Amino acid sequence: MTTTASILLVDDDAAFRHVMANELRRLGHQVWTASSGEEAVEKVEQLEPAVVLLDLRLPGMDGLETLKAIRTRNSSAEIVMLTGHGSIDTAIEAIRIGAFDYVVKPCPLDELQIRIQRAVERRSLSQRASLLERGLTPPDQADSFLGDSPEFRRLLQLIDRVGPSDSTVLITGETGSGKERVAKLIHARSARKSKPFVVVDCAALQESLLQTELFGHERGAFTGAERAKPGLFEVAHGGTIFLDEVGEISLSTQTALLRVLDTSEFRRVGGTKEVRVDVRVLAATNRDLSAMAGKGLFRGDLYYRMSTITLKIPPLRERDGDIGLLANRFVAVLNERFGSRKRIGEAALQALRNHAWPGNVRELLHAVEAAMVVCEGEEILPAHLPPAIGAPTVVGRTVQPADGARLPTLEELERTHVRLALEASGGHRGNAARILGISERNLYRKLRELGLPS
């Protein structure tokens, strides 16, 4: 399949420019022309072409000088040099300093078309690699960490101290409290911030897949393994790997993980060669790993190795004053996304403050978004909030039981809240999970734990 491109043709020969530009347009390309190096540099900045066809011999600024000037401006254009038979050595020098390829003039059109196609493919691959690199190196998101409560300020101070170290960190906290965001901030504050940050959702992967995802596999290791594949520990080399919901992994994977933490070495599945990596490990869980270790469900030595430093994220219900701050921030962000001008009324804010927030910040975000979608006016009222939040059966921090009445246990509150979410979603498990701010898989596990129909 032929790919068309935007091309800047740079040559001081007017007849050559005219003929070649028409031929390239006939092939479907968008073509601009320039007669000098100075004009070419200006047009590259204005037009941002995908490919520059650049003659080596130009009046004033020659081809090599033009090439250097374009490269110093961080242009993403791929440059193909046009050269005569006596200038091939100079063309090779041009490749050394940043040109993609060269073509000898007079240029056969089919040969030039091949060079253009390859240049476009190279540019596309470079752009994809850049996008992937940016995705693997999250920015410092401190500005998005909102909270003024003493508990939250202490957490941020700990992150500032822990980030520059290279220690393993265990991040604990309830579902939806922001464990991954804390991990990203730790990475952004470390010396590894320009290297990959790789997330592994341990709860989402079947046990049979988890080890191959973490450590990779060799060709022929199992049916369908037609080629060797590096694992995520190798992808994270030099950077950070974040093991989310690490309490869900099996004992056999725990053993392999302990070895990596102790030796920085592992073997791919089906392999015999030791692979050595330089990776910082951050892990997160909403489970009590210490209690699990006491019951033999989690390796004690791995728990102690992973909890070198432990950061506990306070649940939202313990962060006095932060609920209103967060809710108003979410409204501002969503107003920008939806092009609206809505605000939270005081009654709705009070309803948010009274809620127990078992789903924490994630649940709050979904609740605000749902209210903004339902609200037709400019003020969000309690009636616009999800039913589970205003339900009188849910006891918040400021709701007191009747005289002599027993406070419900946390498990009873959680069971009631999950049941209300299911009722509000008409029994749809996926929608109920979104209301609660958890994954559908975790909802099914929660239903089993609470003895509710799954």
Image (tube, helix red, strand yellow):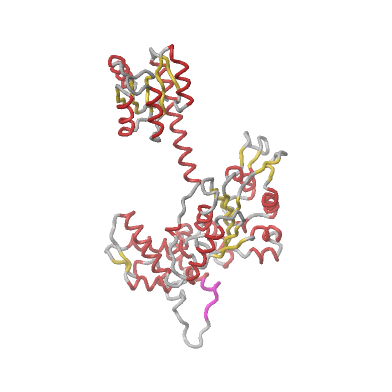
Residue 432: x and y, percent?
46, 61
Whether residue 93 is in magenta: the answer is no
Q: Quadrant of residue 217?
A: top right
Whether residue 410 is in magenta: the answer is yes
Residue that extends furthest to the front in the rendered view of this protein: 60
Q: Residue at 54% across / 73% down in the picture?
A: 410
The residue lying toward the viewer, choosing from 147 and 89, is 89
Q: Is residue 258 above or below residue 2?
A: below
Residue 315: x and y, percent?
51, 68
Asked if one can make out residue 418 in the rendered structure from this viewpoint, the answer is no
Q: Is residue 71 left or right of residue 258?
A: left
Asked if one can make out residue 51 in the rendered structure from this viewpoint, the answer is yes
The residue lying toward the viewer, choosing from 404 and 283, is 283
Q: Is residue 120 above or below residue 413?
A: above
For the C terminus, the image quarter is: bottom right
Residue 156: x and y, percent?
50, 63
Q: Is residue 269 left or right of residue 421?
A: right
The residue lying toward the viewer, choosing from 301 and 369, is 301
Report the span colored magenta: 407-413
Q: Is residue 38 above or below residue 245?
A: above
For the N terminus, the image quarter is: top left
Q: Residue at 37% across / 73% down in the picture?
A: 350
